Image: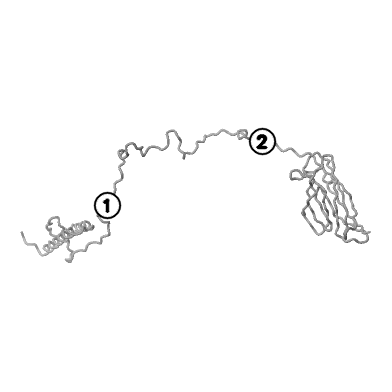
Amino acid sequence: MDELDPIAARRLDTAFADLRADALDRAGAPDPDAPRRIAYRRTRNRIAAVGTLAVAVVAGGVIGVIGTDGAELPDPPVADTPSQTAAPETAPPSASPSATPSGSPSPTASATPSGTPSPTAPPTTPANPAPTRPDDRGQGPEPGPAEPDRPTDLVLTGPAEVTLTPVDGRYAGTIQIVVRNQGEQPYDATAMTMVEPLEVRTRLDGTDFGPCFYTDQNSRTRTSECSGFSTVPSGGSQASTFAITVDVAPAPGTRTIDGYRLTVRSNLDGRFLTDETPGDNTIGVRLRLNGG
């Protein structure tokens, strides 16, 4: 065989060196990156072999490639890869019917009995439900319009003036009123509105009126609303006597106080009925203070 030129001899020496290094690597611990390194060298060899002399490959060895300056090209950086000794993937269980134990129910069998609707299925609603009548809901016919109240007419009478005399350092006296019912409408109670001058006090003890509470006041009078415990029958009447005191020290002579006023109304189920003649529901009483 002809003698090789120096370049070919150097390449052959390099190839044997690679083969020897690879053999030593195989004798030691397995290198997980060895297959990638060999594939990279083979690719590099195919690229550099164009235009150069062919050299023999011994026992599957790999011939290295030398750069134009005679230096060997470095191996590319290799990323870390999982070890080749990792456990193989576990194959999924066989879907064959033979994998189901004998006598066991099929895993794909329906858990809902045949003919029974699914518990999650929405209830079936007819497309055009029949209209529901009031009688079908257990209700009677709708109530008609409420009947209007029958005529009601209360009349209040009393003295136009009362005289008060000195008692215990002030003036005192009484006033009697009469309530008549000239209407036909029954009602629950006779309410009264009382307007008093600020120096006057009215006591309703022993009467069918009271208690009272203030609703308004100005510099001269105060207004109170008083409930009533009884009613006046249709065509009947009811008399009440009130005690009155005036916080004025007795003095010789006479003086009068105006502004005392009483109004009565009929109350039915918490509302005041309309009176046919409201003008005769109110009286005004002048208070005459007689000091002697």
Q: Residue 95 location, x and y as percent?
A: 31, 41
Residue at 72 percent of width and 38 percent of height = 146
Q: Using the image as rendered, state which of residue 72 and residue 162 is in the foreground.
A: 162
Which numbered disc covers residue 142?
Answer: 2
Within-10-Å neighbours for mark 1: few <14, some 14–19, many 20+: few
Label 2 or label 1, whichever comes before in sequence order: 1
What residue sits right under mark 1 in the picture? 87
From the top left corner, tell me how far across and down residue 170 is, in percent: 87, 59
Q: Quarter of the image for the C terminus: give it.
A: bottom right
Coloring applied to the structure: one colour
In this picture, is 139 found above or below 68? above
Residue appearing at x 81%, y 59% in the figure: 219
Q: Picture coordinates of residue 155 (x, y %)?
A: 84, 44
Mark 2 residue crowding within 10 angstroms, few (<14) / some (14–19) / many (20+): few
Residue type (three-letter) at the residue carrying disc 1: Ala
Q: Position of residue 142 (x, y in %)?
A: 66, 36
* Kind of residue at badge 2: Glu
Q: Which of marks 2 and 1 is in front?
A: 1
Q: Distance between the residues labelled 2 and 1?
A: 83 Å
Residue contact at pointers 2 and 1, CB within 8 angstroms? no
Q: Is residue 17 above or below residue 137?
A: below
**How many badges with numbers are in the image?**
2
> What element does badge 2 sit on?
loop
